[in-house]
Image: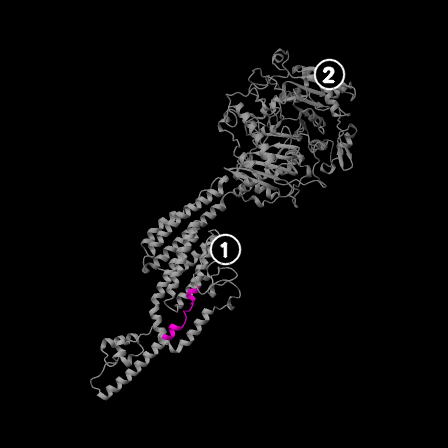
Amino acid sequence: MFLCPLPILFHPFSLTTPKLQLVQFHFPSLPMALGRPRSSKRSSSSSSYASTVTTVVFLALCVLGVWMLTSNSVVPPQTTTRTSSDSSSTSTIATTTDFTSSSDEPQLLPKSEDKEATPAFEDNPGDLPLDAIKSDDSVNIVSDDAKSQEDHSKDNANDGQGSRDSNEAQLSEESTLTQNQQVEATQKIEEKVDMGGSQEQNANLSDQSNESTERAESDNSKSNDTPLETNAQEQQQVQEEPENNANPQEIQAEIANVEQQQATDVPEISGDSQNDRPKLETEGEKNPQEPEIHNQDDDKSQQQIQQQQEQDNSNTSNIEETTSSDQNQPRKRRRHNKKATEDQESQQTESKESQEAPKDTKTEIKVEETTTAVSLETSGIPKESKESKKSWSTQAAQSENEKDRRREESSTDGSIYGYTWQLCNVTAGPDYIPCLDNEKAIKQLRTTKHFEHRERHCPEQGPTCLVSLPEGYKRSIEWPKSRDKIWYHNVPHTKLAEVKGHQNWVKVTGEFLTFPGGGTQFIHGALHYIDFLQRSVPDIAWGKRTRVILDVGCGVASFGGFLFEKDVLTMSFAPKDEHEAQVQFALERGIPAISAVMGSQRLPFPSMVFDIIHCARCRVPWHVEGGMLLLELNRVLRPGGFFVWSATPVYQTLEEDVEIWKEMSALTKSMCWELVTIQKDNLNSIGAAIYRKPTSNECYEQRKHKRPPMCKNDDDPNAAWYVPLQACMHRVPVDNAVRGSSWPKQWPQRLQAPPYWLNSSQMGVYGKPAPQDFSTDYEHWKRVVNKTYLNGLGINLSNIRNVMDMRSVYGGFAAALRDLKVWVMNVVNIDSPDTLPVIYERGLFGIYHDWCESFSTYPRTYDLLHADHLFSKLKKRCKLPPVLAEVDRIVRPGGKLIIRDESSTIGEVENLLKSLHWEVHLTFSRNQEGLLSAQKGDWRPDTYAESS
């Protein structure tokens, strides 16, 4: 503002030295006219002339100043770039607040009486400065305020040069104060927004933003111009604000980066900001703990709100301390920068922890939305008790002569997702059984006298190749139709049909292989033959007293297939020999069977478990080598059980048959077997001899010739895993509390009742008394199967027939499926508690096995595999890829796999299954326990592995 001092106007000739200095202060451009002191040597005329000239010039300048002042007061206030910058900053804050507040909160817009407020970052960008507009055509947008400011500056370029210089000097201090005040308000609001408070906190932010906007407008009304440095700095800051499609974390990171760049040139200081560091670091380390799944969203939101309130209080106190004076501006910037950096690190840490959380945590929410049964039943998975190992022996410990076949302990690589698979390059092709088709081991055998070449010879390392599909393979026919016919291309072998076609074993009928239900001993049907045996010995009582039987040399297993109608389970077995895939026929039909041979080793079953052992037209040399093979049947036959032998020596009179009959008669008598009856079936023209095993040791003690001898007391009859055969007999248990001393309850009562020889003094596998443990396991699996598997997982049982429980304990899973049209092969691992006798006692069946080796079955033979806490134990002994390759081998295309295990193991298995192109339908994890459901497809690799 230009001022003309009143003393000078009214007394132009009375200038004293102080007054002269005042004129010089207001008019620095006149140092020569008013600043030269008077000289006493000048004449009076010169002095009078000079005074007149000075007065005229002075008056002219005063008039000019008054005119400029009057003209300036008429011009309307200009909207400078500073004001638009403030508007853009405030609008940006309002947009950022929208990420954390509800939509009904008031937007933080600048107050303006001349223009209507417009939301930021919409089609109309509002009063943003030109540099902050992200549009491609922003160069063509020029504000009227900028034009008027430019025109006004041109009009005053000549007339007001000195006025502008003076005005800049006067307003530099005021502009700095205005900038500092607005930066403080903006930083307060930004910190509030970054922490994402509640609605009440965001309402406070709106009030603070409006106050800062009003203060900025009042500051701008004091001047018409804004320093260029401040305007450029604010435009740069607004230009670096994130777009509205960014998320809150990116907004906070961007603000922190900008402020860090601004504080780069600030020198290091000590003092309060250093003292605040421990407090800020402590607050930044507070991370919400992961809540339980059922209330995950609610707990997380409540913890975040509580944490944000605490951080909000600490941040407000820190900002109030740092804004006490303008001298602390560098210190305030540094502290705010440090706080923003620590908040950013805290959010990055939380984000990293959420990413490192188990992948199944995200799936947990998905599963709970899909089904409640899964989440309800996963928490009740029973675990083996460590103390129970004292009460239960294992098959590995029982088999004293077991070969040391354990692999070196190694863990599976977690990055196995991209595992590369190849087809097995073997002679067996689509019928490859690794432990039975090990040509290298078979060639090294010294003798094959005892059919050693038909026994198990597993590779040292489990194969990781995949078995190819037969050409033209189709999904298996569903039960019960499959009992009568199967697809020819699934088991494309015709030799058995050519050799045994006349005996009604199997016939080729178009694209099917049909099974008339006959066999060598029952050409006119298996049902007639089954009824014939029942009439011969009524005590057999199919489906009541007799529940589990063993069929030796089963052929295509028609005998066991039709016994299902009598509610009888049949464990059928035959060797993989020149008869060509007879067991594969049985499994494709949906009938239980395994590949095994009566050779030099014990069968993989406990002692005294089968109610009946059946052998129809089997050409097994029972009488040779002291009756070693028949004594093995005696080991697995239950005391009081029957041995049904329907072979040619029973009813034919050929010299060879007569000689065999004499040998068999002497052997069975010395074994104390009772010949119950010999009956002849006139329809089939065959006969059957039915023997019964003794229930006491009296006969053994009365024998004159101790041949065969009794086994030694330290010989464990339950040891069966790679144990050589011995030509001896084990004594019959007579103690009522010992297994084998009494016959089990009739079926189906025996399914649910704990075996009589399980006493309360014995600890169960899960840590409870054995009978209570048994009942708890049964109830648990009924609940899991009904609520989780059938309803939760939605398993379609119409295409499921062959089921395997890869790690069975008491057989509870199989018992829960009792009313369904399926059968379950219960597998008891050799390093687990030997509970397989319990499974047989309740009317189910199973087998011993070590899953570090291949299973004795053909490829594509099971519809459903169930593994409860198996793989977490296996990976301590052997690698998982060969185990999953074995799973892929024995499961049919379209077959399913259900796994319950530790969460970490579930993740490893899931990666392997995905690399095998299995379709993982569900993964669920809670409390470190997981559940996985997957289905096998038709995928096979294109390349073959190198031949071994």
* Front one among 824 and 75: 75
As helix, strand or loop, the secondary structure at mark 1 comes to: loop
As helix, strand or loop, the secondary structure at mark 2 comes to: strand
* Residue 83 on the magenta span: yes
Q: What's the distance in space between the residues labelled 2 and 1, CA to CA? A: 89 Å
Q: Quadrant of residue 217?
A: bottom left
User: Residue 547 placed where, x, y %?
Assistant: 65, 23
Which quadrant of the rendered structure holds the N terminus? bottom left
Q: Residue under circle 1?
A: 246
Residue occupying the far left of the picture: 40
Magenta residues span 70-84
Return the mark for residue 519: none
Q: In screen coordinates, is 62 left or right of 483?
A: left
User: Residue 589 placed where, x, y %?
Assistant: 70, 32
User: Residue 453 placed where, x, y %?
Assistant: 66, 31
When the figure is inspected, residue 540 is found, relative to residue 32, above or below; the finding is: above
When the figure is inspected, residue 389 is found, relative to residue 427, above or below; the finding is: above
**Residue under the point 76% across and 24% down:** 522
Q: Main secondary structure of the magenta part?
A: helix
* Residue 342 on the magenta span: no
**Residue under the point 52% across and 27% down:** 765
Q: Quadrant of residue 628?
A: top right
